[in-house]
Image (spheres, rainbow, N blue to C red):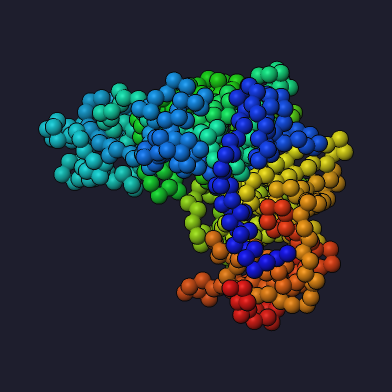
Amino acid sequence: MFGSNFLNKYLNRQFERSSAIGSFTLCVLSLSACSTNQESKHVVLSSNQNVTQTNYGDVSNVIIGGGMRSCSSMGSKEFMQEANSRYCLQGWSKILREDIAFTGLKASDVSFEPAITHPAFSYRIDASSIEKIRALSEQLMAKQIKDKVIAKLIQVREAKPETALSGMSWKALVDLLASQDISPAIQLKNELSTLAHSALRHSLVEPLETATQPRLLQARSVKFLSDRSSSAIYQTFLEATQRKADQKQPGSKPKIGIVTASAENPFNDRDISYYAFKSLGADVVWLPIEGGLRQAIDQQLCEFAPIFYADYANRGSLRDYSHMDLLYPDLAAQQIAFCKNNASALNQELMKLDGIFFTGGNQTRHLESFITKQAMYSVSSSDGVSEQLRLLRKQYAEGRLVVAGSSAGDAVQSGGQWRGRPVPMIGGGDSVKVLRHGYGQIDGPEPEAPGAKGSFAKNGGLGFFRFGVLDSHFSQRAREARLVRLVADSGVDYGFGVDENTALVVHASAADGSHHMRVVGAGGVFVVDARQAKLQSEKLAAFKIENIMIHYLNQGDSLTMTQAGDLQVQLSSDSKKSSQPMMKQAITAERIQDSGSFRFLKLIQKMGEDGADKGIGSTGREQNSDASEFALTIRRTSDSELRINTEGNLSYARLRLDIAPYPSNGVVIDNTLR
């Protein structure tokens, strides 16, 4: 059954398979009847019928591994008439006419450029800007520093002609303030906090010449999305929220809140998420909370929300995100309105939600939007938790809210307690780096990059998924080892790694207290079960663990978490078992934790093809480093199971994984897997 061409076909199906659409058209919920589509197998006949019929009760979570395909206006100018532009079934002229999300919009209202470009901002020193600095709260700029800055600016105005004090670049203004020619000289980098620095820039920036023109919108359509896997994931979440809405008022539209806080520029991500869910027929509200607004709400300095945003957005960022309030004035105004009166308007919106969706980016930014940094280190589960998170947790616990998220929105759902231990949240880290150096506590947002050090939030994310550690972009970025390490280090039982364009769908507790989970989408879900694992007990020794049980599930496979906390795996009975008899043989491979290589998955595939009972892969050694190389040994036992489903996708259950410094097991890895 495992033919020689199987792997290439498998990977193509697994991660790109849904581009071939033909006559396929997804039947999207628009609160009106639509026809059955036999090919998609995801159907909505009316507002109160299921997308996919199950007997597992309401959906509580949709955990998406990122990488969802999108029918987006960005970069589609040449595809106004033609179909198939960036996963679109039709050209954008027709999409704008027929998708209910864009009612009232014209092509001239929408951006079709490949990327958002930011203008060069200019600065001036005049009486108005000085007064803005005077009006700053001392929580933004200490009085002593403020007096010194104002004195300098007044001296500059007296010494320079007015024409020389406008249209300046920020660098020119910084150099002017540092000049010894006019005292007092001010070294902004050394003398001002980052928050005060942002406040000064905000006070001195000149208005944009285009300020009176409405900004162009970034459009995204799900109704005309050609990728069936992404469509099925959207539809699964929508149907779950529809059930919540019907329970409150039959036939009403589901209300979905979107949180874009994980992005360095959450304003930029607002449109695409907003219009995607509008395209599905939902009532959508953008929740403009982010790390900066968190501080503005907590201090009730709402008029200074743009300053808090700029200060927070630029932490750990490779770009400058100052003055986004000038580029997105409508969205910045929403932030201020939601901040006022102790965020009462924001809290009211949260209580109306049937579903909430956390977008991709950096999960630490999501987390710091709902808790204080002190809460990451606190032993109390309530310290530093915002009123907004309390409300969401209450809604979720009462079964009135479906929580979904992609990429960072996957990882941040974890948290809570499992068998008396906190369930941590992965922050970042490359698998090989994490094996060698372990994890450190998150200290603010950091850019994710190959070779990044491991970071985690010990007390977890937002606390909507307590069954184990969550990870995303899984097979694509070879994250098997990083998930195993955090599960082992934290002492929890389980970890769940979700592939791109794939969702782990979690159902609410059944009558017997169990929770059912299933897979929807193009890829699979990797599951770590560490209950029988043996971890190296010597603290200073290199990481070593034995007898981790691993599973990999595709659409059609499922999991059940019993009330007692035992995980049961059910591979689809429609899939075929490996017919190769198992024999004592080792398949070996190099660099199986290289991002983008899929070599962990390929190694297990080769084991199935050859009937081998063992696969051994090395991690490789870092350049110019004496750090240990590791071997990952995968073992088949009598209860192991490898299956291929009807679409040619590999699933497996109850394989064993050992990780140890290489070559401690004495096996020479000669790269049998090519």
Quadrant of the snapshot with the N terminus:
bottom right
Tell which of 356 and 456 is nearer to you. Answer: 356
Q: Is residue 615 visible?
A: yes
Looking at the image, which is closer to me, 62 or 464? Answer: 62
Query: Who is closer to the viewer here, 532 or 17?
Result: 17
Q: Position of residue 525 (x, y in %)?
A: 68, 52
Among the 4 quarters of the image, the one containing residue 47: top right
- Whether residue 410 is visible here, answered yes or no, is no
Left or right placement of residue 271 versus residue 258 in this view: left
- Residue extending farthest to the front is 23
Image location (x, y in percent) of residue 564 = 86, 46
The residue drawn where x is 71% and y is 22% is 246
Q: Quadrant of residue 376?
A: top right
| Left or right, residue 57 beside residue 448 | right
Q: Residue at x 25, y 25 (%)?
A: 128
**Image coords of residue 468 (percent x, y):** 71, 49
- The percent position of residue 612, horizontal first and vertical second, equals 74, 73
Residue sitting at x 69%, y 27%: 45
Q: Is residue 301 above or below residue 313?
A: above
Residue farthest right in this picture: 512
Q: How many labels does the image show?
A: 0
Position of residue 262 in the picture relative to residue 542 (left or right): left
* Placement of 430 over or under 392, stated as above or below: below
